[in-house]
Amino acid sequence: MIYIFNNFSMAVVNRYVVKTVRLKVISRRLNSAADEGVKEFPDKLNIQPLSKSFVSSGKMVKISKAMAAYLKNASDRKKKMDIEIEKYELGKRHLANMMGFDADAITKEDIDKAIRYLFPSGLFSLKSRPIMKHPDELFPRIKNAEFGTDGRPFHFLFYTLNASFYQIMFDCAEKTDALQRYEETQLRQGKLSSEETRLDTTGTEWISREQLQTMLSENVSEVQYERFLSAMNHLTDQSCSLREKDFIMKFRCRMYYMMNVTENMLLQSGDDGSIVPL
């Protein structure tokens, strides 16, 4: 018991001695600073601002590898886009000088007409014809970051690799169930749904797979697109689908029929059996 007490007392004495020595060192430094002419502390201290990665809890937050890669790709793409936009603006001015247009007032329609005039083409495929578009229209836009600096994704469907697509499928299924429950409620109350409450989609069609990919900025496979059409058709066929008109029409576009009629002629059979115009 006496041995334990002696050890404890020695530890207390050692701590006291260490603190005393530290105070003496600080006192000597202050005295030496006073002897050198430093009468008072400076009003402003050279304090460096904290970085954005420093949070209020006092811990340093490390940027995840995914976020670092995204920031690097975004920076590289911005540099490339700046170069392409600069080339486009320079080419637009050259084109305006060639055609006698005002370089500051030239429009997209003027550019398209000038390209068709300078580079006439009889190719049936519009994608094969020469064009001059703004880089924002030619190059796919980059998606916004889907995760924070700590690497945690914002969307609960992030790990499906098609978060936006499956969000649409999820919303479509929820809306279909909601319409079915609404119809059952109307039937129990004796209010039968009429055909007037069904959405009329005449003159419209579902957007193509390419348009859907552009809208979502995601790759959509043929199988996924077929499932998308099946789910959306099932929603549209509901008796009360008019209630979800805004959601459905967001994925439909008008059908445009282009008819190139060169000549309307009435034909009849001649004496020799040949076809002759009237």
Image (spheres, rainbow, N blue to C red):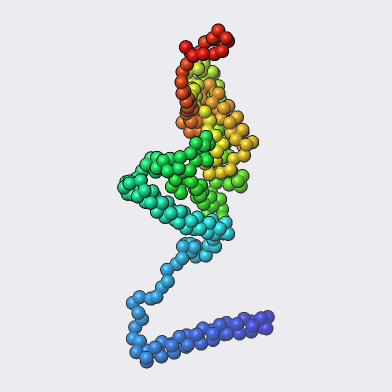
Residue 151 in picture, x, y percent from top left: 56, 55
- Decide if residue 274 is in sight here: yes
User: Image height check: is 200 above or below 154?
Assistant: above
Residue 34 in picture, x, y percent from top left: 37, 89
Q: Residue furthest front?
A: 272
User: Image height check: is 127 above or below 185?
Assistant: below
User: Image height check: is 198 above or below 214?
Assistant: above
In terms of depth relative to the viewer, which is nearer, 216 or 238?
216
- Decide if residue 185 is in sight here: no
Q: Residue at x 42, y 43 (%)?
A: 118
Q: Residue at x 51, y 50 (%)?
A: 142
* Number of callouts: 0
Tell whether 44 sits left or right of 28. left
User: Image height check: is 164 above or below 35?
Assistant: above
Q: Residue furthest top?
A: 271
Residue 264 in picture, x, y percent from top left: 46, 18
Q: Residue at x 51, y 51 (%)?
A: 145
Q: Residue at x 54, y 13 (%)?
A: 275
Tell whether 5 sits left or right of 101. right
In terms of depth relative to the viewer, which is nearer, 201 or 123?
123
* Quadrant into which the N terminus falls: bottom right
Residue 50 in picture, x, y percent from top left: 45, 67
